[in-house]
Image: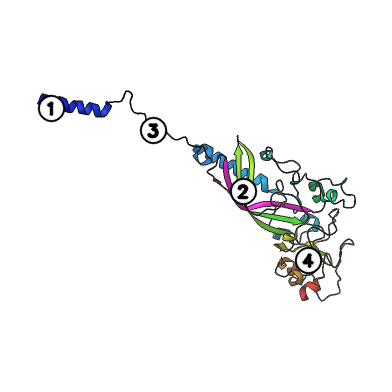
């Protein structure tokens, strides 16, 4: 009996250590790649906040495009236009300081008067910023939804999304009747969808996956004088009292923001409700003898139309 017990004990010892000079090695743990999603919670939240602010620095600029235009209704021209004025800041935001952009893109690229030698304007307006700032009275963009931030599976990666509203105002973009003038700024919404990459705490790359335009991304995109997308987009006619000389200089053959030739020409594309209320409130008489008044520098066929044309066209 004792012999059998000894044999069993020997067998057990052999199963656990027999033939092994060293204990069996444990499996090596796989090395995990650090991603935005695997950061500690406090760092994840900080990265999302940084991404949201960076998205605002990339896309928000200039005049406030979310302004309630009804608050400008029937103000004097100078006050109303003053609240629509604004342009890109001179200095790039600090959050974008490490970002490399092609020399043909952004506000400091050579202006169209330089690249096209338009009327010798290169010496006066050498950059796209300096040129466009005297072509338009007001331009800018603000988020109307978002931006939101979602951490990606890549190191330092954050996806930001939101809806951005752009606005542009020019001096010739008006109708008139007597001393009443209608500013008709253009508004357009862009869907922003960017993948941002941060390296050592700084923005190092931007992958734009949504709609692209220099008006929506002035620091990233090549600037252009083509505003055809805004000519029939979200226009609102704002009645103002009097005329304001905005002091702009136009080097291009035609104005960047086209003015509608008549109300009928842009029915359904311009909100005329505030302008038409001048008639219903008896402030202007369509059947009267008043003739349309406009500054000498406006082209009556391109830049304005009579109220009679717009109510009967």
Q: Which residue: 64% across, 45% down?
A: 206
Q: Nearer the viewer, mark 4 or mark 1?
A: 1
Residue 184 picture quarter: bottom right
The outermost residue toward the top is 21
Query: Is the residue 126 above or below the residue 98 in the image?
Result: below
* Residue 231 in picture, x, y percent from top left: 74, 62
Instruction: Specify the label residue 268 is tagged with.
Output: none
Label 2 – label 3 distance at C-alpha = 41 Å
Discs 3/4, front:
3
Residue 18, percent across and down?
Answer: 26, 26
Q: In this figure, which residue is indicated by the disc labeled 2?
A: 194
Mark 3 or mark 4: whose residue is earlier in sequence: 3
Give the residue drawn at x 88%, y 62%: 295
Q: Position of residue 13 (x, y in %)?
A: 23, 26
Mark 3 packing: few (<14 Cα in 10 Å), some, or many (20+)?
few
Q: CA distance from mark 3 to mark 4?
A: 74 Å
Helix, strand or loop under label 3: loop
Measured as percent of width and height from the top left, residue 234 is found at 69, 62
Kindly identify which residue carries mark 3: 27
Pointers 1 and 3 in contact (C-beta within 8 Å): no
Q: Which residues are magenta?
A: 137-162
Report which residue position mark 4 lands on: 260
Magenta highlight: main SS: strand
Where, quadrant-wise, is the N terminus in this rendering? top left
Q: Is label 2 or label 3 in front?
A: 3
Residue 168 in view, yes or no: yes
First in sequence: mark 1 vs mark 2? 1
């Amino acid at each position: 009996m004792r012999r059998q017990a000894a044999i069993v004990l020997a067998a057990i010892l052999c199963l656990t250590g027999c033939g092994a000079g060293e204990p069996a090695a444990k499996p090596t743990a796989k090395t995990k790649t650090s991603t935005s999603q695997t950061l500690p919670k406090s760092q994840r939240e900080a990265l999302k906040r940084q991404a949201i602010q960076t998205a605002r620095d990339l896309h928000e600029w200039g005049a406030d495009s979310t302004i309630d235009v009804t608050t400008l209704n029937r103000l004097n021209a100078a006050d109303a236009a003053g609240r629509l004025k604004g342009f890109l800041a001179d200095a790039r935001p600090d959050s974008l300081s490490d970002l490399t952009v092609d020399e043909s893109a952004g506000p400091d690229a050579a202006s169209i008067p330089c690249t096209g030698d338009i009327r010798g304007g290169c010496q006066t307006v050498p950059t796209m910023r300096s040129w466009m700032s005297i072509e338009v009275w007001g331009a800018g963009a603000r988020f109307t939804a978002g931006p939101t931030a979602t951490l990606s599976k890549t190191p330092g990666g954050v996806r930001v999304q939101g809806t951005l509203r752009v606005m542009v105002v020019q001096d010739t973009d008006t109708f008139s009747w007597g001393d009443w003038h209608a500013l008709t700024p253009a508004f357009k919404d862009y869907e922003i969808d960017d993948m941002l990459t941060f390296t050592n705490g700084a923005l190092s790359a931007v992958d734009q996956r949504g709609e692209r335009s220099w008006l929506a991304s002035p620091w990233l995109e090549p600037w252009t004088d083509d505003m055809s997308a805004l000519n029939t987009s979200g226009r609102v006619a704002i009645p103002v009292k009097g005329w304001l000389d905005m002091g702009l200089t136009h080097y291009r053959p035609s104005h960047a923001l086209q003015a509608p030739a008549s109300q009928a020409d842009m029915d359904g594309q311009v909100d005329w409700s505030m302008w038409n209320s001048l008639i219903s409130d008896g402030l202007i008489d369509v059947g009267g003898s008043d003739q349309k008044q406009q500054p000498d520098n406006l082209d009556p066929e391109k830049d304005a139309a009579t109220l009679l044309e717009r109510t009967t066209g």
